[in-house]
Amino acid sequence: MDPVLNPYVPGAGRRPAALVGRDDVIGVWDVMLRRAERGTTDQPLVLYGLRGVGKTVLLTRLRHDADKREWITVQVEAGTSRGLREIVGEGLYGPLSDLARPAAGTRLLRALKTALSFKASYDQTGSWSFGIDLSGQSGGGADSGVLETDLKKILKDVSLAAAEEGGGLALLIDEAQDLSAEDLTTVAAVSHAAAQDDWPVLFALAGLPSLPQTLSEARSYSERFRFVKVERLDPDGAAAALADPAKAEGVTWDDDALSHVVDRSGRYPYFIQQFGQEAWDAASDRRIDRRAAELGVASGLTQLDNGFFRARWDRTTQAEKRYLRAMCPEGEDGIGSGEVASRLDRTIQSQSGVRNSLIRKGIVYAPDHGVIAFTVPGMAGFISRQHGE
Ligand SMILES: Nc1ncnc2c1ncn2[C@@H]1O[C@H](COP(=O)(O)OP(=O)(O)OP(=O)(O)O)[C@@H](O)[C@H]1O
Ligand SMILES: [Mg+2]
């Protein structure tokens, strides 16, 4: 069928035509926004789950919901090269410059001046200008060099400025497992201060299944977070993620075609989008039948092998590849790192460097002490399809 009308969108962070199965989280966030607007600030939301399960698109949806309520929103991605100070600083620039105008209220002008000082705290060379003269304004002082102090200052000033307009400040941090322990502890401390003093600042973090444990190991008072596991879709949700976008284009799925794709996707959103896209392309006459579904799964699998899986595999060294092979097939659910080492005829200690490097690359995580598992669903099957690499 016409590929121009194909409604399926496999790809990291790509907004699906139908975002299904996430009403609970969306509802929780909505309550958080409304409570903050009334003066009660809740603890950060932490979304965690496997690769491709839909964390980023959910986080983006939460941001849009805050945008709709006229909040100042900042959505950023943590990385190993930049710290919290810089990603928050850079993330704030766009939204603040959109609001900057000479006739702005005093709280906003104050927040802009504080933002300039925050920027100066990590970047002496670059300078921001919001195009207005802030010299006579109060504010500033977010450049003590102590991250927690500076972050509290900037978030307080920006959120109180947002409150003047009836909203608040939402800070959404993706790939949060890549934040350092110090940065995670700071998020806990700052959000706690916001809740105590009721500045309307809401945090939502998203990351790999290791995130809850990383937060508790960072001595960041994990009881101060609200954890939500983002799961693969339930059977009805998976069917709806396929059938609803087609229906909107006047296309129907045969029942046996639908159940084939739901089944073979393992109900993982990324795979649903990939198989759906290929099945659509293989179908004709506004109807996706079993044959198109089977072709779609087969070519979708090739696409996944060449993209979703290979992108991770190609980032590993030979030693890491050997380690990943030794984790199969149990690594889908988790396998003892002692068992992996013994399959490699090595000691656990000698393998800890490889293991840690795979964790840093976000390919595996430790679901429990001494246990290791793939963050990527279906990784064991992919590895078994790779020969001689
Ligand atoms: N609830 C959903 N319903 C339908 N499709 C979804 C849903 N959530 C995500 N998807 C689709 O799944 C794919 C992966 O989504 P996303 O990038 O948000 O996953 P992720 O959990 O952030 O993955 P990663 O850990 O690799 O960053 C995208 O193609 C997206 O359109
Ligand atoms: Mg993501």
Image (tube, rainbow, N blue to C red):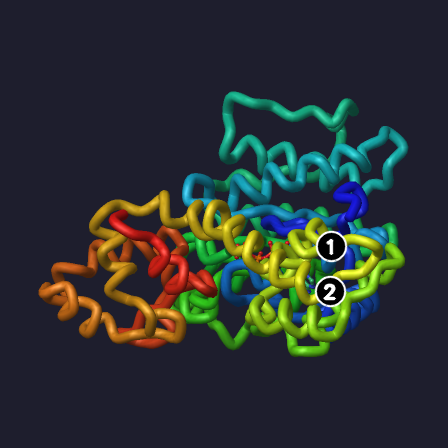
Distance, label 2 to label 1, CA atoms, is: 7 Å
- Disc 2, disc 1: CB below 8 Å? yes
Q: Position of residue 232 (x, y in %)?
A: 59, 71
Q: Position of residue 233 (x, y in %)?
A: 64, 72
Q: Specify whether 228 is left or right of 202.
A: left
Q: Quadrant of residue 346?
A: bottom left
Q: Specify whether 269 is left or right of 319.
A: right
Residue at the (77%, 56%) spot, across then down: 17
Q: Position of residue 83 (x, y in %)?
A: 46, 44
The reply to whether the residue tagged 2 has its Cβ within 8 angstroms of ligand 1 is no
Q: Amino acid at mark 2?
A: Asp
Q: Residues within 10 Å of mark 1 (few under 14, many from 20)?
A: many
Counting every numbered tag in the picture gives 2
Q: Which residue is mark 2?
A: 289
Depth check: give the residue in front, 145 or 74: 74
Q: Quadrant of residue 268?
A: bottom right
Q: Which mark is residue 283?
A: 1
Q: Which mark is residue 171?
A: none
Can residue 231 be seen in the rendering of this structure?
Answer: no
Residue at the (68%, 67%) spot, across then down: 290
Can residue 2 be seen in the rendering of this structure?
Answer: yes
Q: Is residue 386 above or below residue 365?
A: above
